[in-house]
Structure formats: C-alpha cells, structure tokens
Amino acid sequence: MRIAMLAPVAWRTPPRHYGPWERVVSLLTEELVARGVDVTLFATADSLTAAELRAVCPTGYEEDPGLDPKVWECLHISEVFESAGEFDLIHNHFDFLPLSYSRLVKTPVLTTIHGFSSPKILPVYKKYNGSSFYVSISNADRSPELNYVATVYHGIDMDRFTFDPEGGADLLFFGRIHHDKGAREAIEIARRCGRRLVMAGIIQDRDYFTREVKPHLDGKNVCYIGSIGPAERDNLLGSAYALLHPINFNEPFGLSVVEAMACGTPVIAFNRGSMPELICDGVNGFLVRDVEEAVTAVEKIPAINRAMCRKTVEERFTSARMADDYIRVYQRILDITRQSVM
C-alpha cells in the first residue's frame, strides 16, 4: 500500500509549537510507517519524518513572512498530483483546495475534513462528493450535504504526555487567543472562582487579545505565557487543576481537551460541537452551558478521578488507534476503487 500523505505547509510537520493539523499528520504518518506502510510525506522541507519526505516549500509560511502562502500552496499541491501515479491513494489533509485536482488523476483521494472554516467552502466539497472520499473527525462535524466513508477521531502519542495524579491549583486555558476559543470567558470563570488562570496559545486575533485579554494580565491572577512547545506543554497540562474550554463555536474535535485528559487533568467545556464525544460528564470532566455552570463545575473537580481521565484517552484517543482506523479506511477505498474498474 503506497500512500501519499499531503500535509499543510503553514507550519513544519510536526510543528514546533502550534499547528494542530500538522501534528495529526505527523502522528498518523509515523504510526503508519511503524506498521510497514509505504508512506511519502508531502510537507515543508524542514519537516521530520521516518517516511520518505518530498518538499518544495522550504519552511512553513507562518514561520517565514517572506513566503507567499498562495504561491507555495500551489506548488506544494501540484507536486503531489503530478506524481499521483506513483501511489495507491492520496490522503489529503489540506482542506478543500486539492479536491480541484482530484478528477485529473486516477489515484483515489481521501480527504480528512479537519473542520469547516466557513459555510462558504462547502460548495467545493459538494462538487467532489461523488468522486472523492471524506472522513470526518467527529460525528458532530458532519455536513448533512456530504457523504462520509468514516469518522476517525484524532489520536495522540501517549508517551508525550505524563500522567500527574495530583495536578495543581491553577486553572488553564490552552488554545488560540480568539473569540471562538472563549479566552474572555475563561478569564471570567477564573475570576469568579478566585483561582489563578494560566493562558497559553498563539494570538490569532490581535484586536480581541488587546480588548478582551490584555487588560486582565497582571502576572498574578491571570498570566499569559505565549505559544509553547511539546516539553512545556506536558508539564503545563499535567500541573493544572482543570482545563477551561469555554468555546463559542462548534469545535470539530479539540486536541487540547484530549491532551489535558491524557495528563490526568479534567476538562470543563461548553457543551458544543464534538465536546460530548470527548467528555463524559462527571467522569473525565464537565459539560456546561455557560460561565455560571462552569464556575459551579470548578467546585466539583475534586470528584473527578484523574486516573479515569487518563484511561479515557488510552482507550479511545491514541495515535495507534487512529492509524488502525485509517488503514481500514484505506483498504475500504482501495476495494471500492478496484470494484469500480472491473
């Protein structure tokens, strides 16, 4: 089985700090290679992988402002499809744009839809609905206008996350500083609970940060530490009292939720999007409707068994399970493709 793995080129694969799509691609690629699958990773030239690496983009365009994203995305995607005949399947993690190439090649294309940035992109997915294969990353993120071959939850490398049976006293916000992620709500929850809040993540909306977050940063009650790498992430997640995830959008998955639970840290999340598929209320965290319910949930955190948080991830959200699921999807697609040409 020869797989062309098409990664985004916003960040390196795996990312140095932020880059959730690139992180998933890296974990999947390495797991597949470990199983003997012939994988060629199409990613930035500075990417790290045990697979064969093919690259035209020198580094992530988010890391080098001298790179024009449209130019390098164009060169990157064309590199894959111009060599499509070398592969049994192209696994697209690059959103909707590569679909416009898909009918130009005979190689089947599987697209993992990592979320819909806007309803405006749906027409592209609808156009290629009958000729491509789609995987959703949660049941909540499925469009009723599309057909899916499977839902495959993301997985993480459990060896990168250390279980902390005790945790600490601080609440944690770990995600993009953006209205969607509920940074302002996290500050309000922490204030009303009288607990210190540590905030980590890239500033995706500078105006929002300036207006809703910066005025509260005092280094004592609310502390922003920026975007952090894997080593710091492990310690930060494990030492938290709870992860606050007061999202204002229907999140497709939520890697930070699973990563926190892998360290034993319960999660308090607004009950939107995929959250009910990740969090079992009262077992590994709490699903709440608003800030008021989140404040009440913080008081209930001692009732959560941190070992159970870890166990949830071990049973459902490992990178090994993710790779197994995708291998089954690949085989199904190849079977369908063979039958269609007979």
Image: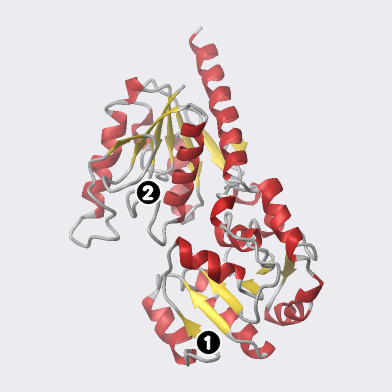
Please tell me which residue lies in front, 64 or 133.
64
Location of residue 86 (image quadrant): top left
Q: Which label is found at residue 222? A: 1
Residue 279 seen? no
Q: Is residue 310 left or right of residue 52?
A: right
Disc 1 and disc 2 in contact, CB within 8 angstroms? no
Q: Is residue 94 above or below residue 306?
A: above
> How many marks are shown on the rendered structure?
2
The percent position of residue 217, horizontal first and vertical second, equals 47, 89
Q: Is residue 282 left or right of residue 326?
A: right
State the residue at coordinates (46%, 21%). 1
Which quadrant of the structure image shows residue 16? Answer: bottom left
Residue at numbered disc 2: 13
Task: Rate crowding at label 1 as few (under 14), some (14 to 19) or many (20 or more) other CA atoms within 10 Å.
Answer: many
Residue type for callout 2: Thr
Q: Secondary structure at mark 2?
A: loop
Is 114 drawn above or below residue 296 in the view shown? above
Q: Residues within 10 Å of mark 2 (few under 14, many from 20)?
A: many
